Image (cartoon, grey):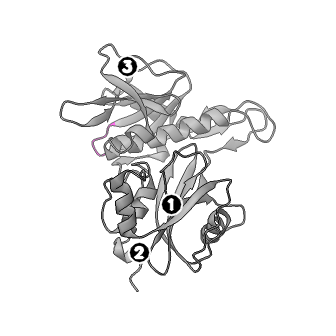
Amino acid sequence: MTTWTERTNGHSIPLTTPSGVDRAAHHRLDEAWLAAAWSHPTTRVFVVSGGQALVDDTPDGRTELVMTPAFEAPVTETHRYFLGTDADGVRYFALQKDALPGRIDQSARPAGLREAGALLSERDAGLLVHAVALENWQRLHRFCSRCGERTVIAAAGHIRRCPACGAEHYPRTDPAVIMLVTDDQDRALLGRQVHWPEGRFSTLAGFVEPGESIEQAVVREVAEEVGVTVGDVEYVGSQPWPFPSSLMLGFMARATTSQIQVDGEEIHEARWFSRDELRAAYESGEMLPPYGISIAGRLIELWYGKPLTP
């Protein structure tokens, strides 16, 4: 039997691969190097605020992050995050601010990853993912979980230190499984969450619980959400999902039962789809596809065999 890994040549399915930016973590504690990098004329900086950054649509149809030299960037004392360097030696920084700066030419617009992630280049999308993840973590973890003291930023935005008890806190990532379940007729199981609009169906997903393997999480989540029992589980690929701090671990799973019983709390509706049924639902507008940047769409396309264009 051909495995999904063989079908995809072992390729992962990240949001941005490769970004072409080396995170260069060994420089994060080198204050002299960081200061020199910040003042270098080729360094590029962008502002992130509330999960958004400014993007610009170019005349040739591309969408780019709005980046400036460091000397043109807004002033900030602490919320300056080093993101890495590229093959040409360009250093990249993000600044976390309470609001995005205005543009005199009015050509730029604010956008988040859901709006612009699929439009940006791999480099720009990778930089934005990194910056948004750091911003989310910084906003939510300002105080020491040991003693309650306000922490300070260190390591170019990648550590928060407690001046009272000396504890160091690092950005957290919550593992979540996302799976396309198929049955013995090779139909795909898709569900609609309670808060989604009518017609929005996607793969099932859920967080890994403490003391649980990722494969066990797949089996448990499918059973809890739709009452279907899963047997074989195969890992396919991963995707960073900083909404606010998840890593989506993508799987293909084979069901051993087909009767659906939704939980009514997370999943409002679930259905089995053949390829013909799914294509017809997309073409008629009865169904809305997953978000363009989501690994869910790519898992569905792996099963379907080619890109789906509604």
Is residue 213 shown to the viewer in this render? no
The part of the image, by quadrant, that contains residue 141 is top right
Residue 29 vs residue 169, the one in the foreground? 169
Is residue 295 shown to the viewer in this render? yes
Residue under numbered circle 2: 4
Asked which secondary structure carries label 2, the reply is: helix
Residue type, label 1: Thr
Expressed as whole percent of the image width and height from the top left, the position of residue 113 reads 44, 40
| Residue at the bottom extreme, as displayed | 1
Q: Which residues are magenta?
A: 86-90
Mark closest to the chain's N terminus, 3 or 1: 3
* Image quarter hosting the N terminus: bottom left
Mark closest to the chain's N terminus, 3 or 2: 2
Q: Nearer the viewer, mark 3 or mark 1?
A: 1
Q: Nearer the viewer, mark 3 or mark 2?
A: 2
Expressed as whole percent of the image width and height from the top left, the position of residue 107 reads 30, 21
Q: Is residue 162 left or right of residue 111?
A: right
Asked which secondary structure carries label 1, the reply is: loop
Q: Is residue 1 magenta?
A: no
Residue found 29% across the figure and 46% down from its top: 87
Marks 3/1: CA distance?
45 Å
Q: Is residue 87 magenta?
A: yes
Residue under numbered circle 1: 203
The dot on residue 191 is: none
Residue type, label 3: Phe
Residue under numbered circle 3: 71
Mark closest to the chain's N terminus, 2 or 1: 2
Expressed as whole percent of the image width and height from the top left, the position of residue 119 reads 32, 41
